[in-house]
Image (tube, helix red, strand yellow):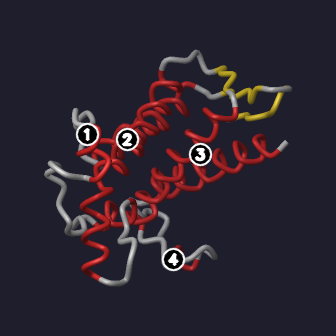
Amino acid sequence: MASIKRKGDVIRVKLEPEERMVIGGFAREVSELLGGVAAADPDPLAALVGMGSETSSTPPEDPALRRLLPDAYDDPAGAAEFRRLTDDELRRGKTSALTRLADDVEESDGALDIDDETADVWVQALNDVRLVLGVRLKVEDDHGNWRRGLTPDDPRKPLIAAYDWLAGVQEMLLSAMRR
């Protein structure tokens, strides 16, 4: 079972091989869902203001992507302009965090000492994984009402277990960061 505790200036994370596989696999899948964003535009000014980008100003069709990349404004024109200017950067940031998490856990022997900056990246990536799982599982509230009616043979049970377990890992990590 995952163990996450602060030891002085580092956070000591211990993960079983199966846990590393689950975290790494989900992180890579969500990264792929984001589209494997290309490197930043070579023109820094163009990258800064979103010029020259092929970014769409329309929201993604996939509900999970819409959850990861929501509209910033209620006004459709403002939301479209904001999306056009920021979508690439948001995707790059999320993809970078997800890749870092996957690389860190997959390349470890299960015992990692991470600093607060790395822990913050991991929390962001775990949150994105949980958001995608939540959309796929149709999580509609924090009280578990969405679980009513689940049958013992419901095919979503493994994903629900992963969703719950990732919540626990994220909470342990946040708790260690606060200490």
Q: Measure how far apart labels 2 and 1 are at the Cα level.
A: 7 Å
Give the mark toward the camera: 4 or 2.
Answer: 2
Q: Tell me which amino acid carries mark 3.
A: Val
Which residue: 41% across, 45% down? Answer: 94
Q: Position of residue 98 (x, y in %)?
A: 44, 39
Q: Position of residue 5 (x, y in %)?
A: 79, 34
Which residue: 36% across, 61% down? Answer: 69
Q: Do the numbered discs 3 and 1 sit on residues whose CB atoms are within 8 Å?
A: no
> On the rendered structure, is 179 left or right of 158?
right
Q: Measure how far apart labels 2 and 3 are at the Cα level.
A: 13 Å
Q: Tell me which amino acid carries mark 4.
A: Trp
Q: Tell me which amino acid carries mark 1.
A: Gly
Q: Do the numbered discs 2 and 1 sit on residues whose CB atoms are within 8 Å?
A: yes
Which residue: 31% across, 74% down? Answer: 79
Seen as rendered, the residue at the extreme bottom is 75
Please give the residue where the numbered disc 2 appears in the rendered image.
95
Q: Position of residue 174 (x, y in %)?
A: 71, 47
> On the rendered structure, is 4 left or right of 156?
right
Which secondary structure lies at badge 2? helix
Please give the residue where the numbered disc 3 appears in the rendered image.
123
**Among the two numbered marks 3 and 1 on one chain, the one whose residue lies closer to the N terminus:** 1
Q: Tell me which amino acid carries mark 2.
A: Thr
**Among the two numbered marks 2 and 3 on one chain, the one whose residue lies closer to the N terminus:** 2
Please give the residue where the numbered disc 4 appears in the rendered image.
146
Residue 36 is marked as: 1
Which secondary structure lies at badge 3? helix
Which secondary structure lies at badge 1? loop
Q: Measure how far apart labels 3 and 4 are at the Cα level.
A: 24 Å
Which residue: 35% across, 42% down? Answer: 92
Return the residue nearer the eye: 126 or 51: 51
Q: Measure how far apart labels 1 and 4 are at the Cα level.
A: 32 Å
